[in-house]
Image (cartoon, grey):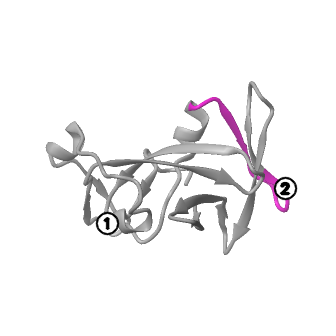
Amino acid sequence: DSGAVDHVMPEHQAPMFPTKETEVSRRGMYYVAANGGKIYNEGEQTVSGLNDEGGNMRLTMQVAQVSKPLAAVSKITQAGNVVYFDEGNSYIKHKKTGKVIKLIEEKGVYCFDLWVWEGFDLIRLGF
């Protein structure tokens, strides 16, 4: 999301990664939803797995009662990446390594997958 300030996901999306309390969650910090409602920060999870290109990925996700995982473009660029949006050819590219993660447009939203281990199974987290 180009307007988001944090990567956010619901806790139930990746229960194999522990949720850690943070200073922000202890203070009762919240996000403001599009409808003006409050969405409280419940801590954070460090989620790691593989992208569709087979590369390792690690994201620090803020845990909140949202409907699905949301990756913040601002955090992606702060991590040394360029994000490029174009019809049929959108991607995230790491500036130093040149590695590319393709973005797929789904109903006007640009998405990528992160595959994580749950026991012996790989499960898909869509962002």
Q: Nearer the viewer, residue 120 or 37?
A: 120
Front-most of 92 and 19?
Answer: 19
- Amino acid type for the residue under numbered disc 2: Asn
Circle 1 crowding by C-alpha within 10 Å: few under 14, some 14–19, many from 20: some
Q: Which quarter of the picture shows residue 9?
A: bottom left
At x 62% / y 60%, what residue is drawn?
Answer: 115
Q: Residue furthest bottom?
A: 107
Q: Residue furthest right?
A: 88
Question: Measured from the top left, where is residue 48 in percent x and y?
Answer: 54, 48
Q: Which residues are magenta?
A: 79-90
The quadrant of the rendering that contains the N terminus is bottom right
Which residue is the extreme one toward the front?
A: 120
For marks 1 and 2, the one nearer the N-term is: 1
Q: Is residue 85 magenta?
A: yes
Q: Which residue is mark 1?
A: 65
Residue at mark 2: 89
Residue 103, above or below 96: below
Q: Residue at x 42, y 72 (%)?
A: 67
Q: Secondary structure at mark 1?
A: loop
- As shown in the figure, which amino acid type bears the numbered disc 1? Gln
Mark 2 secondary-structure assignment: loop
